[in-house]
Structures are given as C-alpha cells and as structure tokens.
Amino acid sequence: MNSAAHLAMDVFIADWINLILRWAHMVVGIGWIGTSFYFIALDYGLRKESGASPGVQGAAWQVHGGGFYHVEKFTVAPPQLPEHLVWFRWEAYLTWVTGFGLLVIQYYWNARAYLIDPTVLEISPATAVLISVLSLVAGWFAYDLLCRSPIGEKPAALAYAVFVLIVAAAYGFTQVFSGRGAFIHVGSLVGTIMAANVFLVIIPNQKKMVAQLIAGEAPDARLGAIGKQRSVHNNYLTLPVLLMMVSQHYPMLYGHAYSWLVVALILLVGGLVRHFINRAEAGDDFNAYSWAAPVALFALICAMSATAPKQATATLQVADDEAMRIVAHHCASCHARKPTHPGFAEAPKHIRLETVADLRQYARLVVAQAVQTNAMPLGNETRMSDEERAKLGAWLRARQ
C-alpha cells in the first residue's frame, strides 16, 4: 500500500472514530441533560399534600405516555433504605468520557491544525495538550474552592464568582489556543465542572447518606444540600455548554479577538433562559421572574452585534492572479483535488479552491471563514495576514 493509500485509510479510520464518539456523546449527553431538566422541574414542582408520609417534603402528580405517576421527595431521606434504589450517574460519566475522547481525536491528534495558532502563541503540540489538560483540572479545583469557601453560602455571590471564573478562563484560552480551540475549551471546562460535580460531590454525598441509613443513623441533611447546590449549577450551565460544544460549526463565534466576550454573553443568555423556565415550572409569580426574558434577549442581541461581520473600510483593487496567489498559499493545500496537507486525503467537505471558478462558487463560505473571521486556514498554519484577508474579501465582493 503506497503512502497516499495509507493516508486515505488513516483519515477514514479517524473519521469513523470521530463519528462514533460524537454519536455516543450525543446519546449519553441527551440522557444526562434530560435527567437534569426532569429532576430540577420535579423538585420545583413539588407540593405539600395532606396525609403525606412522615419526612416527606412534597409530592407531585404527573401524567405521561398514558400513565399517571405519584412522586414524593423526602426532606432528607426515608426512614429506611428502600430495597431498590435507582442511581443517575452513568449518563454524566459517559458524557464526559466521550467528550474528552472527541477532544483527543479532534484537537489533540490534530493539534497544529485545530488547537494551535502560531499568530497567537507559538507552542508545540505536546505543550498545547499539557496546557489543555492542566487547565481543565485547575478550572475544576478553582470552582470547587469557590463552592467550599464562604462565598458558597451565598447563592447570588457564588453565581457571580463562577461567571467571572469561566469568563476569565475563556480570556486565558484565547491567549494560548486558536479561536476554535479556545472556544471548545470553554465548553470542555464547563463540561468537566459539571461531570466532576456528579462524580466527586453529588454521588459521593448520596453514598454517604445511604451508608448512614444502613448504619441506622440519621442522614446528614447538609450532604443533600451540597448535592442540590451542585445539581442546580449543572442545570444552569447546560444551555451555555451545549452552544459552546457546537461552536466549531459557527466561526462567527470564535473567529475574532473578542470571543471571550461572546462566552460571557452566552453564559448570560443560557443561564437566564434556564432561570425563566425553572421559575415558571416552580409556579412562581410571573412578575418575579419575567425580567429574565428581556434581559436574555438583550444579551443575545449584544452577542449578535459582537459577532457582526467587519465592514470594508476601503475599496481595494485586486487582480485575479493576486487573489489566486493568496488562495494557493493559504487554502489550496487542503482544498484541492489532491491535497498536499498531511492531515487530509481529500478536500474538507469536498470544497476545492484551485481556480477562479472554484473561488467564486464558494465565495460565501470563504468570506465567512477567512475574511469576516480568522477561522481558516485551520490553526492559521500558513500565517494568513489581515491584509491578505482584506484583499481576498475585496476580490470576492467585486465579483458578487
């Protein structure tokens, strides 16, 4: 088998690993998010019932799929451990495992293309991967320390502190990684915090309470309260992390110098939408939480404004041969009928940019990826300058 065939097979195998991991990540992620949404909605929907069993905080009557359900929640724990107890944990664990697998196969394996931008910071792939792993670990410890500190006793102050922590991490990532790599790392950090909440706090606390029940002791109510706090955090972070994890398909989010600001706005939008939904499900007075919707809408408009395409300040006259020279140097190594880039056996998405006709055919994509944002070339391996992007944009606008 020749080198071209080896490359094609390597790319084929990598694509299938990527697809299987992505599929699995979606499946288990949907399960985890579903249980998070359900149990928070259930918790907020509990009502006091006359004649309830001792120690019951509240109950809910629900109907679904043609059946009626009666669910009770104990203030701390039942007097005796039930024979059959269902745990919800593997969805969270497997979501993180498959997500980290995607980070490895997509960003660590192709660090020079997806993770590193030499115009941001010139580092080796090994250094980039090390920084990535250490930052995820450090982010969890910083968050956990905040929760365990005196700030953790004040929900509003803690929410603000966690918001600042994530935005600060987002800014730090933009100083180290490519725009695409920085944005996906914010999602990875938030996902790591959420999964670690389950693995290191919520489930261990529940196990301690079960052990206390088995020993005939009164379960520690504080353990349950801590688990509830982390569970609520996970619920509010779900919508922002979902958008960050699909961000690689939308270069307008990360292909500029202020992507950390977009992260802040996404956190606001997602958190406020969840707050609106949670309070509505709790049956609160609409006037008490109605403010969240317009504020979320305003934050969304701000995000759209921050990601608006740059306007050309002057009309440049660019000849066909100069435009093609830029494309040949920065694009055609990947986007060709026979790519010369070692990471591709065929043109990504079958987009070829070898002729004037090719360039005009895919003008909108080129403008979005390489003119209005710096998403392409991948990792800016060829160090495409702002001047070259402006010239390419001028050529494309003149021929639309």
Image (tube, rainbow, N blue to C red):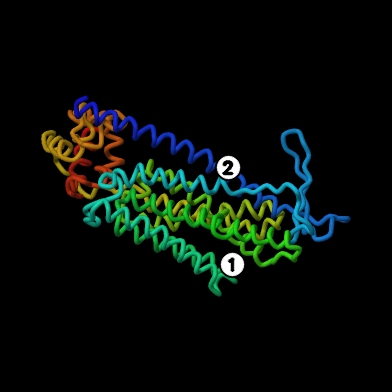
Q: Are the residues flagged by discs 1 and 2 in contact, CB closer than 8 Å?
A: no
Q: Name the residue under label 2.
A: 31
Q: Is residue 389 above or below residue 361?
A: below
Farthest-out residue, top: 1
Q: In this view, does 209 lie above or below 322?
A: below
Assign a secondary structure to mark 1.
helix
Q: In which quarter of the image is the C terminus?
A: top left
Question: Where is residue 23 shown, x and y percent of the image?
Answer: 47, 36
Kind of residue at disc 1: Pro
Question: Where is residue 40 shown, x and y percent of the image?
Answer: 65, 52
Which of the 4 quarters of the picture holds residue 172?
bottom left
Question: Where is residue 343 shown, x and y percent of the image?
Answer: 25, 37
Q: Nearer the viewer, residue 244 or 85?
A: 85
The answer to whether 368 appears left or right of 246 in the picture is left
Q: In this view, does 279 lie above or below 376?
A: below
Disc marking residue 155: 1
Which of the 4 quarters of the picture holds residue 54?
bottom right
Q: Residues within 10 Å of mark 2 (few under 14, many from 20)?
A: some
